[in-house]
């Protein structure tokens, strides 16, 4: 019988390390005081476990929902306890067969410098020359799969479709627009919150048209960008964007409801799209998307996106905030549009 592997302790693992706790539940917009940096013991991995030194932490819009004490598809963060989320790093000690110090892994215990976890909760990832490990929490990770599954499996993108995506300069949106183009959409329109982002959409990501939603009503700007209407809307924003899209969708149009970031910090429920009844006559399909439902697509997603990345047909960007101590600022900045592409936190050293 094979001997149970014993933990290989790494000399570089400290006795204690930093982790971010939820200090208060925000009302409306979160503030730095909602987070507390706590020094906590680094636990040596037991049998079947690994100790990971995180190199990149992911901050994502869904984390705002987890700061509220409400039942949702993912449990809320616990008050006074360490938060979690996507992270990527290197194994520094292992009590698990098949995992050795130096292995790069992606896992779900972010918001901390070191993580001890069952090896089964981590996925070993190859280190690709010229590609930062952070890609595994971005284009090659959850946001990339969200874009891929949302557009293809839920949205049923067809060649020739006219596509509109909101949040188009963000982690998910920038990939959605590019996949739509690569898969033969006849028109790709994006909206974003600054002139620089809008410029990038057309100049670098190959969108046919883009607009700054802060420049005027979304309905009017969308009508200008897609005068013949749209077939598919990928919604990252909700609110006025969704209402405008319902107005612009053609008969049998589809809307993929991925996110509603415009309302995540609202303290009262937002009004619904006032024109929802249009969905009847136009026979629209509005369908919610949860990336966790689409794990089966992962191999196809990795193969196809990996190919486009290698060939240079697909581009991705990251906004990197340096320093573990700046993780809350990165998250707060994300909610206010401080990122282009995926927002990540790079840990020191
Ligand atoms: P992004 O990288 O797009 O970052 C969030 C962006 O939202 C900001 O950069 C900002 O860009 C934009 N934003 C903020 N407030 C507003 C507003 N009031 N109106 C319009 N845009 C706003 O994040 P992700 O790509 O990670 O996520 C995009 C969306 O997808 C989110 O809604 C998220 O919750 C959702 N999501 C859903 C998943 C699922 O399984 N359903 C999985 C992953 C993400 P700007 O400067 O353009 O305003």
Image (cartoon, rainbow, N blue to C red):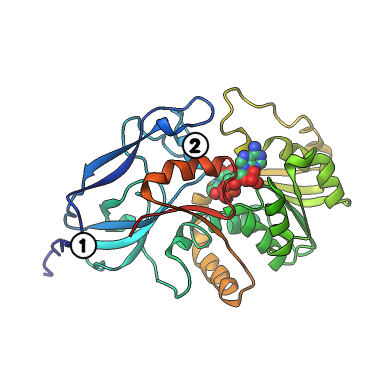
Local SS, label 1: strand
Of tags 1 and 2, the one toward the viewer is 2
Local SS, label 2: helix
Q: Which residue is mark 1?
A: 94
Q: Classify residue 101 as left or right of residue 305.
A: left
Mark nearer the N terminus (1 vs 2): 2
User: In the image, is the residue at mark 2 within 8 Å of ligand 1 by its beta carbon?
Assistant: no
Indicate the position of residue 290 as horizontal and vertical percent values.
Answer: 54, 47
Mark 1 surroundings: few (<14), some (14-19) or many (≥20) residues within 10 A: many
Asked if residue 52 can be seen in this view, the reply is yes
Can you tell which mark lies on residue 64? 2
Indicate the position of residue 110 as horizontal and vertical percent values.
Answer: 37, 49
In this view, the residue farthest toward the right is 228
Identify whether 80 is placed above or below 47. Answer: above
Q: Classify residue 55 as left or right of residue 309.
A: left
Mark 2 surroundings: few (<14), some (14-19) or many (≥20) residues within 10 A: many
Indicate the position of residue 273 as horizontal and vertical percent values.
Answer: 73, 32
Q: Residue at x 50, y 58 (%)?
A: 138
Q: Nearer the viewer, residue 78 or 295?
A: 78
Can you tell which mark lies on residue 339? none
Q: CA distance from mark 1 to mark 2?
A: 33 Å
């Amino acid at each position: 019988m094979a001997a149970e592997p014993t933990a290989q302790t790494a000399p570089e693992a400290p006795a204690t390390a930093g982790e971010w706790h939820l200090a208060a539940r925000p009302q409306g917009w979160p503030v730095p005081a909602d987070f507390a940096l706590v020094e906590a013991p680094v636990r040596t991995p037991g049998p079947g476990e690994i100790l990971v030194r995180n190199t990149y932490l992911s901050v994502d819009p869904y984390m705002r929902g987890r700061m509220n004490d409400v039942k949702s598809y993912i449990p809320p963060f616990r008050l006074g306890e360490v938060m979690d989320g996507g992270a990527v790093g290197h194994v520094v000690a292992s009590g698990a067969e098949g995992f050795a110090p130096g292995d790069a892994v992606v896992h779900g215990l972010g918001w901390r410098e070191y993580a001890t976890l069952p090896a089964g909760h981590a996925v070993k990832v190859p280190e690709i020359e010229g590609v930062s490990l952070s890609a595994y929490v971005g284009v090659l990770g959850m946001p990339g799969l969200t874009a891929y599954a949302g557009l293809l499996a839920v949205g049923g993108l067809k060649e020739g479709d006219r596509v509109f995506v909101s949040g188009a300069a963000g982690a998910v949106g920038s990939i959605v627009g590019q996949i739509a183009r690569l898969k033969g959409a006849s028109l790709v329109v994006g909206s974003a919150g600054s002139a620089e982002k809008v410029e990038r959409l057309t100049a670098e990501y190959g969108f046919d048209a883009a607009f700054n939603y802060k420049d005027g009503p979304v309905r009017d700007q969308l009508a200008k960008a897609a005068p013949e209407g749209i077939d598919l809307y990928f919604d990252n924003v909700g609110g006025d964007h969704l209402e405008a899209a319902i107005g612009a969708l053609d008969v049998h149009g589809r809307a993929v409801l991925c996110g509603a970031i415009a309302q995540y910090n609202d303290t009262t429920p937002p009004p619904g799209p006032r024109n929802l009844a249009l969905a009847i006559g136009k026979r629209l399909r509005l369908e919610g998307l949860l990336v966790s439902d689409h794990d089966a697509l992962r191999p196809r997603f990795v193969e196809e996106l990996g190919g486009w990345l290698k060939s240079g047909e697909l581009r991705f960007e990251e906004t990197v905030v340096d320093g573990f101590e700046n993780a809350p600022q990165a998250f707060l900045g994300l909610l206010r549009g401080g990122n282009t592409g995926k927002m990540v936190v790079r840990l020191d050293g």
